[in-house]
């Protein structure tokens, strides 16, 4: 009988090889995984019939994943000469362009929408246009002189963040609702509202 958490076992090099847990319906579910010699997952098997397989290129980057029901999809990844992921294909291609620093500046979806990323002189992401399904969403972010996120605005919702002198985030305020973060030294303990 399983307790409240999953039962796990690991292979000789520390990769998770078996996980047994109860699903929300009370049924026992077992997932097994196998890996290549450097620890990349090759096969994940749930129950007895659900399988996901992964392949990698010579640089150990994922290039494909395929699965049986209910994971019955195939994903493919392609990279440019600098190692940036430039295309993800699942239900149609998604492609990306990058700046010289390797940051995404545009993302193109299979449905024709374009997501644009803008960065400040310190490399902080300050604006994302077109992030939602309709291609119309906008996110604007502001940072303090320590490059910490202090403000996040998404389609009319504003979130602000405060930090203490030691650099730890102390609070977030989202549309007037305050959440305070509780720390014990540098160890995060809890949030209070």
Image (tube, grey):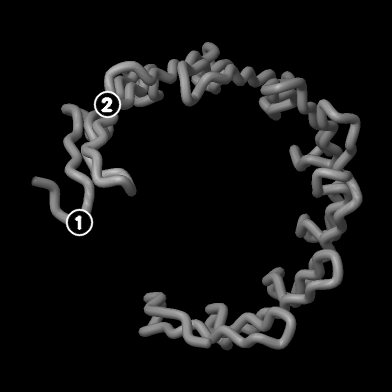
Please indicate whether residue 79 sits to the left or right of residue 96 in the image: left
Q: Which residue is mark 2?
A: 32
Q: Which mark, by number, is residue 4?
A: 1
- Viewer-proximal residue, 60 or 106? 106
Label 1 neighbourhood size at 10 Å, few (<14), some (14-19), many (20+)? few
Q: Nearer the viewer, mark 1 or mark 2?
A: 1
Q: Earlier in the sequence, mark 1 or mark 2?
A: 1
Q: Position of residue 33 (x, y in %)?
A: 30, 25
Label 2 neighbourhood size at 10 Å, few (<14), some (14-19), many (20+)? some
Q: Which mark, by number, is residue 97?
A: none
Seen in the picture, residue 180 relative to 156 is either above or below; the reply is below
Please indicate whether residue 43 sits to the left or right of residue 67 in the image: left
Q: Secondary structure at mark 2?
A: strand
For the point 71% across and 87% down, which residue is it?
A: 176
- Viewer-proximal residue, 150 or 193? 193
Q: Position of residue 51 (x, y in %)?
A: 39, 18
Seen in the picture, residue 173 relative to 81 is either above or below; the reply is below
Do labels 1 and 2 touch, CB within 8 Å? Answer: no
For the point 76% across and 21% down, which residue is it?
A: 92
Q: Position of residue 12 (x, y in %)?
A: 16, 27
Query: How far is disc 1 from disc 2 in space, using C-alphas?
Result: 20 Å
For the point 8% across and 46% down, which residue is it?
A: 1
Question: Which of the 4 image quadrants contains residue 167?
Answer: bottom right
Q: Position of residue 180 (x, y in %)?
A: 53, 86
Please indicate whether residue 65 sits to the left or right of residue 38 in the image: right
Q: Secondary structure at mark 1?
A: loop
């Amino acid at each position: 009988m399983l307790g409240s958490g999953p039962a796990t076992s690991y292979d000789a090099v520390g990769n998770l090889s078996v996980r047994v847990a109860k699903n929300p319906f009370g049924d026992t579910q077992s997932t097994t995984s196998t890996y290549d010699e450097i620890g990349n997952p090759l096969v994940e098997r749930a129950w007895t019939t659900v399988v996901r397989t992964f392949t990698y290129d010579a640089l150990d980057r994922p290039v494909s994943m395929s699965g049986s029901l209910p994971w019955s999809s195939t994903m493919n990844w392609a990279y440019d000469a600098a190692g940036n992921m430039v295309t993800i294909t699942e239900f149609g291609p998604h492609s990306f362009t990058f700046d010289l620093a390797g940051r995404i500046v545009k993302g193109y979806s299979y449905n024709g929408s374009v997501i644009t990323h803008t960065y400040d002189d310190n490399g902080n992401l300050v604006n994302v246009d077109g992030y939602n399904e309709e291609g119309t969403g906008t996110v604007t972010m502001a940072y303090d002189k320590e490059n910490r996120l202090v403000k996040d605005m998404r389609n009319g919702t504003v979130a602000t963040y405060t930090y203490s002198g030691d650099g730890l985030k102390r609070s977030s305020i989202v549309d007037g609702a305050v959440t305070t973060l509780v720390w014990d030294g540098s160890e995060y303990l809890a949030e209070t509202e």
